[in-house]
Amino acid sequence: MSVLLEFRDVEASYGGAIAALHGVSLSLAEGEFAALLGANGAGKTTLLKAASNLLPAERGRISAGHILFDGQDVTAHDPGDHLRRGLVPVLEGRRCFKNLTIEENLITGAIGRGLRRTSIAQGLEQVYDLFPRLKERRKVAAGLTSGGEQQMAAIGRGLMARPRLFVLDEPSMGLAPLVVTEIFEALTRLNVETGLTLLVAEQNSAVALKHAHNATVIENGRSVLQGRAADLAARSDIRDSYLGGA
Ligand code: ATP
């Protein structure tokens, strides 16, 4: 299987001084569902932002190493180019436009990608099939929906941009366990049915390891452990040392 995303000894810093990544390597194959695990502040969000070349917007930069998406250096393209090439990040959790309806929020995802009307209709169909609750709530202002529905809408909006690589930052954050399960089952379904490649950062390691194929553990900006999710989940020493006993 071909490699879709590759980090080679990546170092990244903010404002020229604060180093957030100190040497991260990872490789994501097309069709893989990968989890990125680590405690608060470990560097997960920085890594996801680096993948889409979003660090410069925060006065951050890659100071060493390389990141390749689909064989090309990510720093050579701006985030909009990456989006059009299929690298779609859903980073700020469930950041919806609160005054727009759920359906309008979904459509904004397709507009960013420059898609036409038939693609938009197909996209909506796919999202509503995945999250029937969004169909019921499609005419409701996003600000009036639940946290779970807003997270589903944020994921749905990303899907409307037709990702090849879907990058998600802590989709479980602040949500009830049943909703978290529903969301991860939907991600698994996308991966299995459409072959979508997923990179999902999570502090909820239990749910991430249950659904992902492989996982990378980040600690203080370094990738300290990589392996098959099932193997990592089975090792109590790893759970205790890196995963908060989850
Ligand atoms: P969390 O789960 O809290 O988001 P994380 O694993 O995603 O944690 P990052 O947000 O990537 O970790 O943070 C890694 C380090 O980089 C931290 O020390 C953080 O304070 C720092 N950092 C993150 N964003 C910025 C920024 N915009 N400017 C300066 N430092 C930052």
Image (cartoon, rainbow, N blue to C red):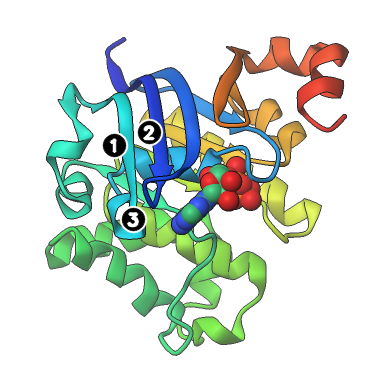
Q: Quadrant of residue 175?
A: bottom right
What residue is pinned by disc 1?
Answer: 164
Please state which amino acid type lies under the numbered disc 3: Arg
Give whichever of discs 1 and 2 has the lower sequence position.
Answer: 1
Q: Residue at x 70, y 27 (%)?
A: 210
**Which element is circle 1 on?**
loop
Would you name the residue on which mark 3 appears?
Answer: 59
Classify 232 as above or below 204: above
Q: Is residue 210 among what the camera can see?
A: yes
Instruction: Tell me the CA gap for discs 3 and 1.
Output: 27 Å
Please name the residue shown 66% across and 49% down the image: 182
Residue at 43% across / 80% down in the picture? 97
Give the residue type at disc 2.
Leu
Which label is found at residue 196?
Answer: 2
Whether pointer 1 and pointer 2 mark residues with C-beta atoms closer than 8 Å, the reply is yes
The x, y position of residue 88, in whole percent, is 32, 47
Residue 146 higher or lower than 246, as above or below = below
Which element type, helix, strand or loop, lies under badge 3? Answer: loop
Q: Is mark 3 within 8 Å of ligand 1?
A: yes
Front-most of 24 and 129?
Answer: 24
Q: Residue at x 53, y 65 (%)?
A: 94
